[in-house]
Image: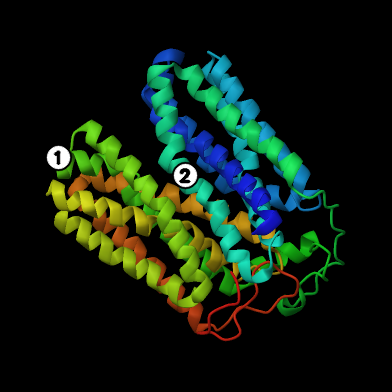
């Protein structure tokens, strides 16, 4: 990426810090419950409230921030995450910690939406997919190293040390944004958007008006893409959310081996993320269509080999490689129908992917409590089939509406590979 490489990598580091903050709590909930004197179920709300706030406020927060300088928005979001981690490290009051889970959740979708658009704008159009993939690598590295390291620090150096680690990463990323990102001025707003979607793109060099950005919500095609995103993430997290449950109860692995499997899963995600980025560059439509179908086959395999440790160990690696594609595949698919309001479209992706996580986790929990962990893969396969249906329905409507001056150019024909995602 030449001179822009360090800037894009800084955005990826910021994503790593945010994911470590969001998901690192999962591994330290027992310590929080013990140290702050609350029940485990109450401590669990530190995870739930974050996802709910992201899902509920993402598009609107991004819309409000769209008129501000991107560099300032990104740096401010990372500063809030650094501050919140510092508060976690210093407080012994659960109510204070709870409040500072809500605050960064308001900035989470804003950072992701702006970071994805900024990364795409830092590189030539034909490398936009690679830039988005690099940013998303921060998510996979966060799952692979940030979450396990947070848990390790809490266990061996204390809960405060785990949160100081998160504060340090976010502060470092904030400084990187301030030093490495170009100081571009806020782009002027375009005139009020016309009523027809085809004409709603902002003029080159201008951001869309608020009305223009909201206009994309009137497109039926967009909502089919949104439905596909929800179903893909539900397919992913209805099973992954109970990763340890499945490997312990069905496969019979010990807790230490489950921890090693979780680490291996995350490492393979990093490689899989890069692979799916390349596939999307070559052919977006076929990659997006194949992804949920691949997940159906994967879950059938996991169900078949679940009770046997040796095959399941190999299955975990394959699972991690496929799982990693869900982020960049879903984002690329939704971005295709939000080309004239890319930041607002990215915020829709963040919100509805979190809705998918919530729905998938709830259904997965219901399956575990009623039918047992053995049948979890079938819940994921059902959501994957629903995602495939939504993708096929969307494809029947033809190519995305062309838009000017966007980070993700539209494909030239329905089944032709796009120039970039």
Say whether residue 53 is left or right of residue 366.
right
Who's the residue at 15% across and 58% down the image?
304
Who's the residue at 31% across and 50% down the image?
239
| Image spot of residue 306 (x, y percent) | 17, 51
Pointer 2: residues within 10 angstroms few (<14), some, or many (20+)?
many
Say whether residue 169 is left or right of residue 243.
right
The kind of secondary structure element at disc 1 is loop
Q: Of the numbered discs in the image, which one, if any, rests on residue 65?
A: none
Q: Is residue 291 above or below residue 360?
A: below
Say whether residue 86 is left or right of residue 70.
left
- Is residue 118 visible to us here? no
Along the viewing direction, whichever of 323 and 296 lies nearer the viewer: 323
Q: Which residue is mark 2?
A: 141
Verify CB contact (< 8 Å) between mark 2 and mark 1: no
| Image spot of residue 232 (x, y percent) | 42, 60
Image quadrant in which you'd find residue 347: bottom right
Along the viewing direction, whichever of 285 and 156 lies nearer the viewer: 156
Along the viewing direction, whichever of 344 and 274 lies nearer the viewer: 274
Q: How far apart are the two marked residues, 2 and 1, measured between alpha carbons?
A: 27 Å
- Is residue 96 visible to us here? yes
Say whether residue 145 is left or right of residue 310.
right
Q: Which residue is mark 1?
A: 252
**Earlier sequence position, callout 2 versus callout 1:** 2
Who's the residue at 34% across and 53% down the image?
320
């Amino acid at each position: 990426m030449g001179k822009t490489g360090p800037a894009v990598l800084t955005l990826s580091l910021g994503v790593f810090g945010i994911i470590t903050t969001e998901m690192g709590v999962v591994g330290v909930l027992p310590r929080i419950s013990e140290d702050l004197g609350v029940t485990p179920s109450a401590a669990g709300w530190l995870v739930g409230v974050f996802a709910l706030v992201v899902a509920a406020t993402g598009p609107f927060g991004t819309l409000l921030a769209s008129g501000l300088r991107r560099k300032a928005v990104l740096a401010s979001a990372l500063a809030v995450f650094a501050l919140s981690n510092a508060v976690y490290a210093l407080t012994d009051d659960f109510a204070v910690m709870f409040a500072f889970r809500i605050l960064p959740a308001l900035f989470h979708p804003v950072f992701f939406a702006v970071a994805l658009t900024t990364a795409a704008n830092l590189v030539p159009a034909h490398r936009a997919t690679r830039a988005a993939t690099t940013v998303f690598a921060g998510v996979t590295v966060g799952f692979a190293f940030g979450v396990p390291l947070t848990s390790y620090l809490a266990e061996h150096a204390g809960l405060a040390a785990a949160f100081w680690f998160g504060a340090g990463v976010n502060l470092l990323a904030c400084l990187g944004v301030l030093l490495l990102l170009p100081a571009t001025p806020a782009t002027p707003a375009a005139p009020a958007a016309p009523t027809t979607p085809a004409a709603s793109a902002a003029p080159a060099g201008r951001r869309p008006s608020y009305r223009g950005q909201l206009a994309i919500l009137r497109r039926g095609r967009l909502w089919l893409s949104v439905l596909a995103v929800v179903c893909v993430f539900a397919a992913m997290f209805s099973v992954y959310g109970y990763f340890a449950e499945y490997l312990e109860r069905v496969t019979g692995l010990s807790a230490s081996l489950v921890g090693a499997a979780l680490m291996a899963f995350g490492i393979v995600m990093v490689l899989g993320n890069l692979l799916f980025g390349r596939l999307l560059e070559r052919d977006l439509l076929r990659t997006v269509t194949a992804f949920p179908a691949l997940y159906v086959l994967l879950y059938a395999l996991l169900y078949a080999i679940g009770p046997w440790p040796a095959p399941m160990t190999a299955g975990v690696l394959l699972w991690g490689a496929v799982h990693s594609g869900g982020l960049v595949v879903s984002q690329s698919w939704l971005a295709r129908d939000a080309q004239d309001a890319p930041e607002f479209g990215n915020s829709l992706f963040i919100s509805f992917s979190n809705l998918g996580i919530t729905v998938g986790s709830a259904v997965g929990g219901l399956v575990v409590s009623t039918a047992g962990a053995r049948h979890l893969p079938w819940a994921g396969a059902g959501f994957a089939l629903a995602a495939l249906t939504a993708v096929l329905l969307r494809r029947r409507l033809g190519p995305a509406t062309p838009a000017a001056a966007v980070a993700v150019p539209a494909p030239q024909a329905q089944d032709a590979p796009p120039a970039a995602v």
